[in-house]
């Protein structure tokens, strides 16, 4: 099983920056995709950015050019650098990791971290 712990949320003014991190621990054979989703009040959860084991990355159109996803495979950690933040980026951000147990592929979610962009 894999456990995820997220850090880095908080309150920031528009135009500011935050860096989220998500560390995976536990028993697994291999970690595949590591990504970030967010859910704003009254809205559905959406994929923000994803880092594949191949090195490919994905960004939602709304964050392209402002957010950067990266991962440290030695620490089983994924980061989300968020720059030029806007009020519409306010949401709870969740880390999601796909991994193999050696027998089957599974996924798990972090507990979520609140990001609030407001003046």
Image: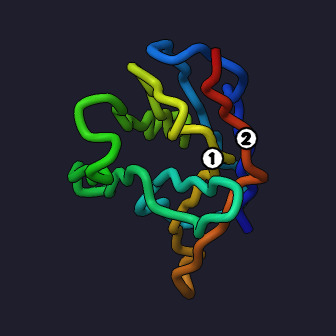
Q: Position of residue 59 (x, y in %)?
A: 30, 50
Alpha-carbon span between mark 1 and mark 2: 5 Å
Q: Kindly state the secondary structure of the residue where label 2 is placed.
A: strand
Between residues 83 and 51, which one lies in front from this camera angle?
Answer: 83
Label at residue 6 = none
Between residues 61 and 21, which one lies in front from this camera angle?
Answer: 61
Q: Position of residue 11 (x, y in %)?
A: 70, 20
* Residue position for label 1: 93
* Residue position for label 2: 113
Please name the residue shown 41% across and 60% down the image: 33
Give the residue at the far bottom of this rendering.
103
Between residues 42 and 45, which one lies in front from this camera angle?
Answer: 42
Q: Is residue 91 left or right of residue 65?
A: right
Decide which of tag 1 and tag 2 comes sooner along the chain. 1
Can you tell which quarter of the image residue 54 is in? bottom left
Please name the residue shown 59% across and 69% down the image: 44
Q: Kindly state the secondary structure of the residue where label 1 is placed.
A: strand
């Amino acid at each position: 099983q894999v456990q995820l712990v997220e850090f880095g949320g908080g309150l920031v003014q528009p135009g500011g920056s935050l860096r989220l991190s998500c560390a995976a621990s536990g028993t697994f054979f291999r970690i595949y995709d590591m990504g970030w989703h967010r859910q704003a009040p009254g809205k559905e959860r959406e994929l923000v950015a994803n880092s594949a084991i191949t090195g490919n990355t994905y960004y939602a159109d709304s964050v392209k050019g402002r957010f950067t996803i990266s991962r440290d495979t030695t620490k089983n950690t994924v980061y989300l650098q968020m720059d030029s933040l806007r009020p519409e980026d306010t949401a709870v951000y969740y880390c999601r990791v796909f991994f193999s147990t050696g027998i089957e592929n599974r996924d798990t979610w972090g507990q979520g971290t609140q990001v609030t962009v407001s003046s």
